[in-house]
């Protein structure tokens, strides 16, 4: 009986694995066409000054408007894109589209001239995607200054090869781009490594932010990250702020910028802000 049950569970396992493989293959095929078919979209989440509530930047977040399955989030297709070697072309599209959109919003005075857009770079795009040239070309094409763009990399990029990362990041920084470490606190980068890198800000992962108002441990962790960032001459940006109590706590701890559903979800379009009377 034990043997029969084992055999049975194997069969179920094989079938679900097969279904998963077929699913992956279908997603991969569809994804190859998605860029050309203009099915990819960027949605933009405001990054706000926690003291004033003013929007200072927008994070560009990728979505796939699938013809039959609706609007898909990155978690539903980025892993497939990575495996299929599609991250570099998709990443290039993201950079070009974010620059196009920002230039258009600037022309229409929907955003102020000092607002910047923050773009996520995958590890593969960072190492093999010629990020510096891609960004430079898009900026030139749209006649945008480099200070209008921030690039978000993960700690994984940094620890993978510190020396190579250092020279790549220095090149991007010398172009005038802002550089952020995303999801900070979830990876393995050490203080000594961070000190060597031209990083402008650490983005505190939302897993810490979610507990910051209710757990003393989380609060001390966030306090430490903020102090550490500031001591290294970096800014700090909190992600995933959902509640007023989290906002208040982060302000008290000295965090200057943040984003989250409390302020706004990622949006497709911005409405023009009425000009303030002088
Ligand atoms: P991330 O860069 O850490 O982006 C923040 C994520 O948190 C986004 O998820 C955002 O929608 C979500 N978020 C924002 N505010 C809140 C909140 O208050 N509560 C909660 N629970 N979540 C919030 P999203 O858009 O699903 O993106 C997931 C991840 O996919 C991103 O994490 C980023 O790592 C990756 N990603 C997104 N767009 C791109 C892209 O264009 N290129 C690359 N390489 N990766 C991207
Ligand atoms: Mg990000
Ligand atoms: Mg993040
Ligand atoms: Mg995150």
Image: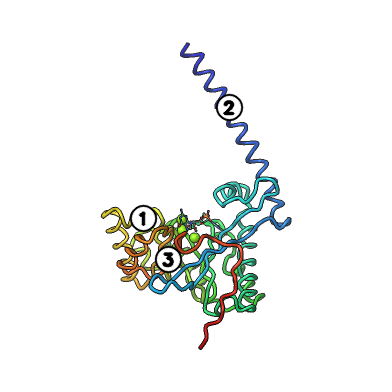
SS category of the residue bearing label 1: helix
Residue of label 2: 14
Element carrying mark 3: strand
Q: Earlier in the sequence, mark 2 or mark 1?
A: 2
Question: Could you say where residue 67 lies in the image, as x and y percent from the top left?
Answer: 70, 49
- The residue at the point 34 percent across, 53 percent down is 211
Q: Earlier in the sequence, mark 3 or mark 1?
A: 1
At mark 2, the secondary structure is helix
Q: CA distance from mark 3 to mark 1?
A: 13 Å
- Whether label 3 touches label 1, CB < 8 Å: no
Horizontal and vertical percent position of residue 234 = 38, 71
Where residue 48 appears, as percent x and y from the top left, is 45, 69
Is 103 above or below relative to 40? Answer: below
Judge the density around disc 2: few (<14), some (14-19), many (≥20) Cα neighbours within 10 Å.
few
Q: Residue furthest bottom?
A: 278
Residue plotted at (42% across, 63% down): 203
Disc ID at residue 208: 1
Mark 3 vs ligand 1: CB below 8 Å:
no
Which numbered disc flags the more N-terminal residue, 3 or 2?
Answer: 2
Quarter location, residue 213: bottom left
Q: Is residue 18 left or right of residue 162?
A: right
Please tell me which residue lies in front, 62 or 277: 277
Residue in the image at 52% along x and 68% along y: 58
Q: Between 203 and 278, which is closer to the camera in this rendering? A: 278
CA gap, disc 3 and disc 2 = 45 Å
Please give the residue where the numbered disc 3 appears in the rendered image: 258
Q: Horizontally, is 211 left or right of 183 in the view?
A: left
Which residue is located at x 47 percent, y 59 percent? Answer: 261
**Label drawn at residue 153:** none
Characterize the local packing of mark 1: few (<14), some (14-19) or many (20 or more) Cα atoms within 10 angstroms. Answer: many
Q: Residue furthest top?
A: 1
Please provide percent x and percent y for residue 163.
44, 63
């Amino acid at each position: 009986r034990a043997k029969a049950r084992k055999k049975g569970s194997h069969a179920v396992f094989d079938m679900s694995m097969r279904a998963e493989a077929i699913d992956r293959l279908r997603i991969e095929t569809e994804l190859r066409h998605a860029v050309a078919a203009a099915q990819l979209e960027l949605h933009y989440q405001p990054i706000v000054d926690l003291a004033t509530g003013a929007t200072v930047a927008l994070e560009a977040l990728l979505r796939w408007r699938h013809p039959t399955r609706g609007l898909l989030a990155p978690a539903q297709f980025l892993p497939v894109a990575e495996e299929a070697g599609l991250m570099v072309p998709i990443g290039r599209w993201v950079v070009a589209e974010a620059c196009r959109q920002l230039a258009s919003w600037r022309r229409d005075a929907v955003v102020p001239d000092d607002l910047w857009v923050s773009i996520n770079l995958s590890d593969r795009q960072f190492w093999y995607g010629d990020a510096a040239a891609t960004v430079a070309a898009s900026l030139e094409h749209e006649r945008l200054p480099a200070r209008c763009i921030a690039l978000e990399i993960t700690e994984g990029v940094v620890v993978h090869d510190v020396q190579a990362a250092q020279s790549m990041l220095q090149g991007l920084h010398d172009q005038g781009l802002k550089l952020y470490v995303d999801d900070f606190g979830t990876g393995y980068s050490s203080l000594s490594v961070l000190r060597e890198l031209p990083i402008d800000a650490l983005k505190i992962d939302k897993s810490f932010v979610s507990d910051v108002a209710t757990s003393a441990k989380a609060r001390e962790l966030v306090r430490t990250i903020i102090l550490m960032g500031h001591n290294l001459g970096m800014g700090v940006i909190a992600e995933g702020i959902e509640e007023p109590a989290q906002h208040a706590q982060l302000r008290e701890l000295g965090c200057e910028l943040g984003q989250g559903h409390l302020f706004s979800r990622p949006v497709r379009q911005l409405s023009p802000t009425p000009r303030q009377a002088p």
